[in-house]
Amino acid sequence: MMMKWRKSRVSRCFLKAELDVTECLAYDQIVAALAQDGLLRTRGEYAIAHKLLDEEFDLSFVLRAAARSEGDSPGASPRNSRPGPSNTRRRQRALLMDDPGSVDLNGFSIVYQRVWERLAAIKGERVMQAAKALNFTMLELSDIQAAFDHFDSDQDGLLVAYQIIEALEPLLPRLPDEQQLRKALPAVENSDDEDDEAIAVIDIFEFMKLLRTLTGGNGLVHVNKAFSLANDVPFEKQQELLQVWPISESYIQSLDASELIEMLSNFLGVKAEQNLRELSYPVSSFRKLREFALRQAERAQQHTRF
């Protein structure tokens, strides 16, 4: 289940792509469309997306034309399907070599969501490694991520100048003055117009480096505000989170508030009122909660395999 803003974004991305006469996107153009939308920003992410589509994801239910095997059911829900055995993926790769097929808007949305989820999980691991390298504790990382996510209003993973100041405020005992901040900020490209002021734009990794530069190795101010499913995750967000697991959207929509939070708590392995900041993997925002859910879902899937 995508958030409304992401559904709109995916729809715009799909319509901007070069569609065929049936208003479908060719398989070999999917990664390019993801990159054009900004989901893939580096060569590494571009390569990961190619590998996911070509080797890991079972796309037989969303690909049209020859790439769909004869035994597949057109009406089956791809979110409810689990990756098939290796021979299924080999058959898919053979079909793709012969005729790559295409995806409609629904199929593209599914691919987009799955790539986004995998990249988010990978980025979460990288953020943890970077935080440890900068000598931040997991509690400090929890506060950093919460502040960053709160002021990343458009959820593009970046903060601009005024958002940087706002995100720093709850983390530092004293805000830097303008000169200190300019000196500490990563270098930014100069504006083409000398009269225009260049705007700093940083991601979570640069934000952590900025914090470490400003603190000089000292600790941060801990926000210490509890974060729990019951008090900090709205009903709609809980519905979105539950679909990390292979559960149909119609079933999730049928759950009332008490049933939803009970099922979500069971899948996550936490209590509804529990302070998730105190976990070994501290959770202080919905973005970190989604990363935690993806970890739990992957572990459950690995357990069923063995």
Image: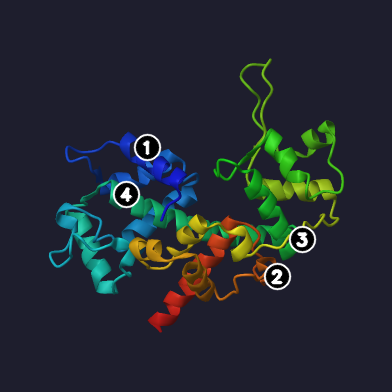
Kind of element beneath mark 2: helix
Q: Residues within 10 Å of mark 3 (few under 14, many from 20)?
A: few
Instruction: Identify which residue is drawn at 58% across, 57% down.
Output: 286
Whole-number angstrom distance, CA of label 2 to CA of label 4 = 37 Å
Residue kind at label 2, given as amino acid type: Glu
Q: Would residue 197 appear left or right of 242 to someone viewing this image?
A: right
Choose the circle earlier in sequence order: 4 or 1: 1
Label 3 or label 1, whichever lies nearer to me, is 3
Give how far across and how far down residue 109 sits, in percent: 35, 50
Kind of element beneath mark 1: helix
Whole-number angstrom distance, CA of label 3 to CA of label 1 = 39 Å
Q: Please indicate, yes or no, whether residue 187 appears anywhere in the rendered image.
A: no
Q: 271 or 171, which is in the foreground?
A: 271
Choose the circle earlier in sequence order: 2 or 4: 4
Give how far across and how far down residue 116 sits, in percent: 45, 53
Give how far across and how far down residue 97 sits, in percent: 21, 56
Residue kind at label 1, given as amino acid type: Arg
**Quarter in which the C terminus is drawn:** bottom left
Label 3 or label 4, whichever lies nearer to me, is 3
Residue behind mark 4: 108
Q: Which mark is residue 12?
A: 1
Looking at the image, residue 245 lies above or below residue 145 = below
Q: Residues within 10 Å of mark 2 (few under 14, many from 20)?
A: some
The quadrant where residue 35 appears = top left
Instruction: Identify which residue is drawn at 21% across, 66% down.
Output: 91
Kind of element beneath mark 4: helix
Instruction: Identify which residue is drawn at 56% across, 66% down.
Output: 292
Q: Which mark is residue 278?
A: 2
Whole-number angstrom distance, CA of label 2 to CA of label 1 = 39 Å
